[in-house]
Image (spheres, rainbow, N blue to C red):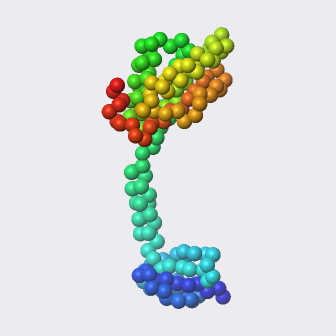
Amino acid sequence: MREIRVIDDEGAQLGIMTPQQAITIARERGLDLVEISPTASPPVCRIMDYGRYHYQEQKRTREARKNQKSIELKEIKFRPKVDEHDYNFKKKNIQRIMAEGNKVKATVFFRGREMAHPDFGRRILDRLVDDLDGVAMAEAAPSMQGNQMHIILSGVSGAKKGQAGQ
């Protein structure tokens, strides 16, 4: 018969015994026998209230999830021949999004003959990165995928929240 090492509900070791003896002790105390370390020699089991333990674990994970801030990736689209006002309006939106703690995917999309001049899109994205210096930084160089050129901007760790309204 295989034997197990048993730890009681206060943390004291009860010793090595058969699983049937450990189950009997756990039932007498109105608790459960839970295998803690199956790979140990002999395997280690603990007498505990498993329902309460499981509830406390769920409570801990819920509390940890509540304190987390999920970062979203939001997309702002430009055209190669974007007007100055539209550019400034979208730049302010990017600053606002950055102040909220999210990332931005700035995309320039080309149609038809505009595909022959990807340098226009690169200039827009480079200008955007220069204008947002201190608020955002590019995670990588602008890249072309199909008829779109994009860059992902993330917030600078030292950026102040008040810079979004510039």
Please, is residue 91 above or below residue 42 in the view? above
In the rendered image, which quarter contains the N terminus? bottom right
Residue 125's x, y, as percent?
A: 53, 23
Residue 100: x percent and y percent?
A: 39, 36
Residue 19 location in percent, x, y?
Answer: 58, 84
Nearer to us in this view, 147 or 22: 147
Give the number of marks.
0
In-front residue for pair 50/152: 152
Based on the displayed image, in which of its 4 quarters is residue 145 positioned? top right
Residue that appears at 59% across and 28% down: 142
Q: Nearer the viewer, residue 85 or 133?
A: 133
Residue 30: percent from left, percent from top: 43, 80
Residue 108 is left or right of residue 146, and the answer is left
Closest to the observer, 129 or 61: 129
In the displayed structure image, the side of residue 110 where residue 72 appears, left or right = left
Up the image or down, 46 lies above or below 116; here it is below
Is residue 120 rendered to the left or right of residue 50? right
Residue at the (49%, 88%) spot, across then down: 14
Q: Is residue 77 something that shows in the picture? A: no
Instruction: Pick the quarter of the image with the C terminus.
Output: top left
Examine the image and state in which quarter residue 43 appears: bottom right
Note whether residue 116 is visible: yes
Residue at the (53%, 24%) spot, across then down: 126
Q: Is residue 108 above or below residue 140?
A: above
